[in-house]
Amino acid sequence: MKTKAVRIYGKMDLRLEEFELPPAGEDGILAEVVCDSLCMSSYKAAKQGPDHKRVPDDCATNPTMIGHEFAGRLIEVGDKWKDQFEVGEMFGIQPALMYKGSLDAPGYSFTTVGGDATYVRIPSCVMEMDCLLKYSGQGYFLASLAEPMSCLIGACKAQYHMTPGSYEHHMGIIEGGKAACLASAGPMGLGLVDLLIHGDRKPSLLVVTDIDQPRLDRAKSILTPEDAKAHGVELIYLNTATPNAVQDMNDLSSGTGFDDVFVLAPVPVVIEQGDAILARDGCLNFFAGPTDTNFSAKFNFYNVHYGNTHIVGTSGGTKEDMRDALAMMSAGTINPAMMITHVGGLTACEETTLHLPDIPGGKKLLYTHVDMPLTAIEDFAELGKDSPVYAELAGICERNNHLWSVEAEQLVLTKMPKLNLS
């Protein structure tokens, strides 16, 4: 079977190519990829090339597929897995396999499986590690967002607090406590706020900060204080581009500080703000991944000693976290569609991945069988003046609070030009 895929050959060297996939064989599975949501981690892999811990040293001669937040359907199942999987089933993949302790992962390390491809051969190790996950919800794009949502679920689970006078650790955010999400009007921040409002464990107060007022306004229009209140959460959006940001946040906590603080930007001043608003036994989660190996920030160790403040860091999620994400999306509990601000086809993958930090907005969603330039959802209406397809897309998104949807996905899959490299 032929596939078209974007492969990495070296630093900032990505190529969209057509080539032959190996057969499924007895222990493999062939699958059609429908969509992939681009992650900054793919940009980091492209930038570092073989120096990246997950990209093979010989990628120049044995290039690997990129893309690790993807979804699709199974089209051929090897005999070894026929008692567990069926042709036609929808799937997502947890890329952090940890197979025999290795860091190898789909989207970085394998020549036959990655999200930025039309078809893939999933090797046996993925199924052996129970990382090929079934999905029964509506829309492929939601399953492709299960991986980033699993990271947020893992971050909430990693929070911990201690019983006063003991060394007993209690995992997770404090139910009914005070939480703050700093630099959180971006895509991952929106996903985190959605999870904290609609998940099983909720704070009573949730303060969401950013220094970009339009992004805060968009977040507030999607995740409204009124909806949060209906779920028992007081939600406050705060612009912290002021010299009194720390005081403003502490005032919102009535001077007691915040039990759970999440930092979603690798910026020293944001970390220091988070440190300054921690309550006694408060836990700060440094969720943002820096590219600088020497990245550091000040932290108040007086409060660590006398106030029992502490810090955790999480990177990625487990397969259980991803199953939780898929289940919550299938049930309609969370809606990560709010993360998506741009949509395109596989033909847009190379340039988009290589310039991801320079493209504003949230998640970039690519449909791998489609030839479509990367396009902001907010630009559909203007493009619709000359294109009936974009006009129809604009109408669908407008009816859906300018968010991506299953209806919009179906239109792209049926009416946008198909990818053709041959």
Image: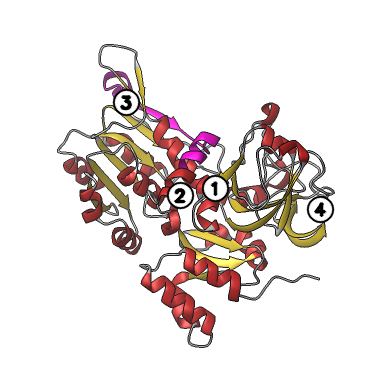
Q: Nearer the viewer, mark 4 or mark 2?
A: 2
**Could you say which is closer to the camera, residue 387 or residue 53?**
387
Type of amino acid under label 2: Ser
Quarter assignment of residue 53: top right
Task: Give the distance between the C-alpha atoms of the residues marked 4 and 1, in whole angstroms.
Answer: 24 Å
Mark 4 and mark 1 lie on one chain; the one further toward the N terminus is 4
Type of amino acid under label 1: Tyr
- Within-10-Å neighbours for mark 1: few <14, some 14–19, many 20+: many
Residue found 78% across the figure and 62% down from its top: 17
- Residue 21's tag is 4
Q: Nearer the viewer, mark 2 or mark 3?
A: 2
**Quarter of the picture holding the N terminus:** bottom right
Q: In x, y percent, where is residue 183?
A: 37, 49
Is residue 373 rendered to the left or right of residue 188? right
Single out the residue that lies furthest toward the top. Answer: 166
Mark 2 and mark 3 lie on one chain; the one further toward the N terminus is 3
Task: Give the distance between the C-alpha atoms of the residues marked 1 and 3, in whole angstroms.
Answer: 39 Å
Give the residue pinned by disc 2: 330
Is residue 92 rendered to the left or right of residue 203? right
**Mark 2 and mark 1 residues within 8 Å of each other at the beta carbon:** yes
Mark 1 and mark 3 lie on one chain; the one further toward the N terminus is 1
**Quarter of the picture holding the C terminus:** bottom right
**Mark 1 and mark 3 residues within 8 Å of each other at the beta carbon:** no
Give the residue pinned by disc 1: 135
Residue found 41% across the figure and 32% down from its top: 157
Indicate the secondary structure of the residue bearing disc 1.
strand
Asked whether residue 360 appears in the rendered view, the answer is no
Mark 2 and mark 1 lie on one chain; the one further toward the N terminus is 1
Relative to 363, residue 319 above or below: above
Give the residue pinned by disc 3: 309
Asked whether residue 374 appears in the rendered view, the answer is yes
Q: Nearer the viewer, mark 4 or mark 3?
A: 4
